Each structure stands twice: as structure tokens, then as C-alpha cells.
Amino acid sequence: VQKDGVSMLKRFSLQFYRFYILKLQVMSNSGSPGRTVEETLRPISPKDELKEGTEKRTLLDQDLKTVPSEGAVMAPQCSTSTYNAKYTTEIHKIEIKNLPKVGFSALKKFIKKLCNFEPVKINYQLGRTFAFVTFRNDDLKEEAIEKLNGAEWKGRKLIVKVAKPAVDPMRKRKPQYDGEEGEPKRKSLQSHLSPEERVAEACTPLWCMPYKEQLELKQGIAHGAVRHITKAIKRDCKDLEWLKEALSVHKGLFCKLEELVASPVENGYRNKCEFTVGPSVDGYDKTVGFRVGSYKEGDLSVVPPQTCVHVPEEVKCVVKVVQEFIDTSPYSSFSPLDNSGNWRQVAIRFYTTGESMLIFQFHPQDLSTTDIAAEEERMKKFFTEGPGASLNVNSVYLQVEGRKLPGNQKSGRYALISGQERVHEVILGMKFRISKESFFQVNTKATEVMYKLIGDFCGENPNATLYDICCGTGSIGLCMAKHVQKVIGIEMVPQAVEDARINAEINGVQNVEFHSGKAEDVLPQLMINETAAQVIGIIDPPRGGLQTKVINAIRKCRSIQRLVYVACNAENEGAISNFVALCRPNTKHSPGLPFKPVKAIPVDLFPHTNHYELVVCFDRSL
């Protein structure tokens, strides 16, 4: 309930805290509470509220900081917790004004080219004429100001000044008793929940909802996403005849939206889980589990995953043994508050083949190579001779990282502690090798369902060539190879291309070839010699979508008659801009023939969450 812009719940909370402080003062023996009852319990007006982006404190802050007279009873003080005295993501921040209309990548490249070093963080939205840029230290910040201020870019003279840093969220959350300013601790909205319920809410917000109702909810979410994409296409691509017809036939959507396809597995479906090592809700330093809050929220508590429905039981058993190993380590967990400690994360891969992989992430701090080697030896004994041997883990890695180099690069290395370098998974009868850094869909059974849908879109066509753009390790293309004459994969990561070629050898697939390079460079060259009667393209891009030049390269390839786009986040601006760019009529900035969406199918790869994959089929008439 809102009144004058202030929630009644917040009003009640503030009044309750005032009453609590007043009671403490009345209980004192001094008889001089410091403030009268009328002053303490005066009504709250909206003007008294803390407004975002200002330095103004609430009346509650003033009440908590009131110093009672001698002999008065003090409010119980929380034990102080170490916070990051230098909030490194904000204190070295500048603001750049009068920017031309450019993309995020162009801005990043411009800053790097002019300064000869990369920033830590860039806060910029497309279309705006200003951006906030953060650097690693004060010297780099000052150097950036000197080089960027007054520089001309695309006919505009840049204005650069020091930006005001945002308040450290941990300082916001925790009361300070060392004379520094800060807001009093406020309880989380989930403070009434048990730790087990909090971790379930954080990781699987739909865990209490029957799966049938989850599917209905996600169908609505997918419908809203497609409607949002439709509005973007209408706004950008005016007077499209096919769009007018589609809006009429499909009730305001740019194409037909099928029913959400359910996951064959509802619980324990994740084949990869990444666990944080950090303080528990009870304060124990080295708990292995999921974080229930964030630095921004001022809560870094970690809760074990034993009640998480999306984590397989086998992985939960592994976590218990990993916890035992971490408990016996002489090193503490890494703290993002002051960048101290060592153990950061544990990634566990567990596949339907029964093969598993452990990857420990360790910050070396100032440890010597001898100290790290000793810990590696202790880890090896634990998982080969000690309690961890019973897990029969196929691969155990220790990733030593953390020292950051200029240009925002990370130094680090992977050490194979025990076992084999890679593990394997099977999809639609095809065997794939998975290395320590490989991307692989987290729900194997649902991925098989999605690949079958992609195969239905492609159809049985022995005379067609299929281009798997952004192919990764080749899983989609290899699964489609038996339906077409030839598969050509394009991937810019050389290691992934090597894995794709080996995966083809493992499965005896010979009608495939994989090329390393940028799609916008490789695709046009390959199309020059393309003679197939039908060409099909498949795109499974990263979460942020594809760059415009990749979309333009696809549009210019007249041979591609059908395109299947797999969006892992259809509500992301990158994916939306990709859909719009594919449909836009031929212009100077969007050369080539446009595509027309004909069908969209959402697939649930992530039960108990709001996430899903959207598979969209595009056609075009030549």
C-alpha cells in the first residue's frame, strides 16, 4: 500500500524502531533520554524519506546515532564485520559526456585505443550520450581523464569529469561503529525464511509451484517476450505486409507461438553446478553451497544445496565430501569485501554417462609456489586415497587464479590433480567430450528434446547444406548431420573447433567440417563456393545475442533460405535487436534480404525457474 509515495510497511518499520530506541532510553537511570517522546514519535512525511542518489539520511539514521546521556542504556551493537574500505568497483569512476551514438563494443575499443589500457567496468546504454567508466586505480583514472577529456570522436568533443561513486552496498547494510557514516542494518524481505527456504528461493523461485502451473506461468512469460519483440519489430520496420497479416492471424504476435515444451526431467536435472565457498548464515567461514544474496544486497551468506530440487542427489553427495576437504584446509574462503582469503568456488560436472569432474577455484594471495604445491598434493591424496576416493571422480582440477594483469586480464592456470583431462556426455546417441572450460547445456534430457525440434525445423533434406553458426563444440550440427548432405560449423574459439573436430571423429561423422574465425569473415567466403540446392542456418548465440555485422553477413548470404535461432534469453535486448535486424527491410545499414519468422516454440530447460529457451524459425522467399 502506497501513501504519498511511501509504503505503509516502511512507515510501520520506522515507527517500530523509534519506539524501540525510546524504550531503551526510558529504561536508563539518567532520566535524560536525549529526545522527547513527541520528537521521537513525530509523524513521518515523504520529505523525511531517503531519496535515491542523495546524501540525505532518514530520521531512523538520526535516531540510531543519537548519543544518550551518561548512564543511559545503549542499544545492543552488532559485531562489526569487515567490509571493503575501498569499494574498488566505484571509487575510481569517471563520467564521459557528449558521446556520439555508438555501441558498447565501439565505446570499449575507443577507450582502450586512446588510453592504452582497459577499464574495469563500463556503465552505458545504447542511445545515451553519457557513460560511467571505472578504472582499477587512481593513477589510471587520472590518466584516462587527461587523454579522454576534449578528445574528438565522430564529430563530438568529449567532456570527462570525476564521477561520484555509489555507496558500498555492504556499508549501506551494516551499521558502522568506527565513526564512519552508513545506514543501519535492514532485514531482508526473506529474513523470515529458514536458510534452506532462502537458498531454494534464490536458485529455484518456482520450487513450491506444481510443475503444470510452472509451465502455464512460463507460457505467459514467453507470450510476453514475443509480444515485446513484436512491438520492437513494428516500431523499427514499418509497413511490412507479412507483419500486418501475422498480427491479425496470431492475435498481435509476429508469428505463431506454440505451447511450451516441458522438460522430461523436473528435479535433479542440472549436469553442472557452481558452488561458492563462503560464510554460512551462522558465520562459519568455509561453507560450500549457493549464495542466497549478493554484494549489492549486502548479504554474502552461503547455504548448502541439500534442499535444492534442481541439484542431482549424486552432486549433493559430492558437495558433502568437498565440504569435508575444505574443512580440513588451512586456508580460508575468499571474501569480496576485502579481497582476502583463498577458496572461491567449486564447479561440479556430473553427466548421464556417470562421468564427473571437479574444478576448485583458488586465489593464491601471497602464497608461495611451495605452499600451493603442498595444497595440490593434499588434494590429490584426499581424492585418490582419502575420503574423496569413494566418489570415483573422473577429473579433479585446481584453478589457481586471482592475480589481475593490466587490461583487466586474469593470470591463472589449471592443474590436473587426478584423473583424465575430459569427461563425456551423450545426446541423441552422439558422444561428446567435455573439457574443463567447455560450454554444455545444463539439462541433457531437455536438450535432446530441443535438438529434435531443431531437426524438425530443418527437415529431412539429403541435398541441403546446414551452416551451424557459433557452433561451439559442434553438438547441434553433429546431431543434425544425418538429416542433410553436409554440415559446416563456424566458431571463433579455436579450442572449441578442435573439440568439435574430435567429436566428429568419435562419432564417425564424415559429412562435417569446422572452421575457426569470426562468422562475419568466414561465412561470406564459404558462400562463394556454395552449390547446394537448399541452405539452412542455425544460430545458438551467447546470452547477449550476435553483433550486427554477423546478422548482416547472414542477410547477405542469399543462399540461406531457412534460419533457426535459439535464444536462451528472448527478453534480452541483444536477442530482440537480432530479431529486428533479421526482419528489417533492405537498407544501407541492413543490407541483404530480410527474413520472416514463421513459428516460435519455447522449451523448458530450467524447471523451477523463470528461464526457458525460445526456438524461432525464420524463412525468406528469394
Image (cartoon, rainbow, N blue to C red):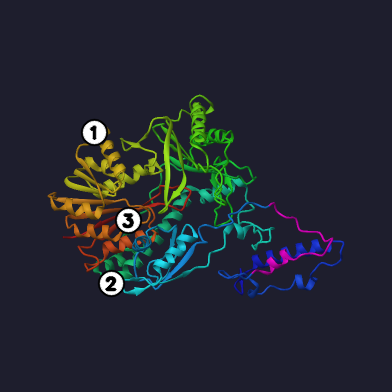
- Between the residue at mark 3 and the residue at mark 1, the CA separation in whole angstroms equals 33 Å
Disc 2 residue type (three-letter): Lys
- Secondary element under disc 3, as helix, strand or loop, is strand
The residue that disc 3 covers is 600
Disc 3 residue type (three-letter): Ala
Say which of marks 3 and 2 sits in front: 2
- Frontmost residue, 499 versus 400: 400
Left or right, residue 506 beside residue 526: right
Does residue 402 appear anywhere in the picture?
Answer: yes
The residue that disc 1 covers is 508
Residue 63 is a magenta residue: yes
Q: Which of the two discs, 3 and 2, labels the residue nearer the N terminus?
A: 2
User: Within the image, what quadrant is residue 63 found in?
Assistant: bottom right
| In this view, 52 is above or below 461 | below
Specify the label residue 366 is tagged with.
Answer: none
Left or right, residue 500 beside residue 59: left
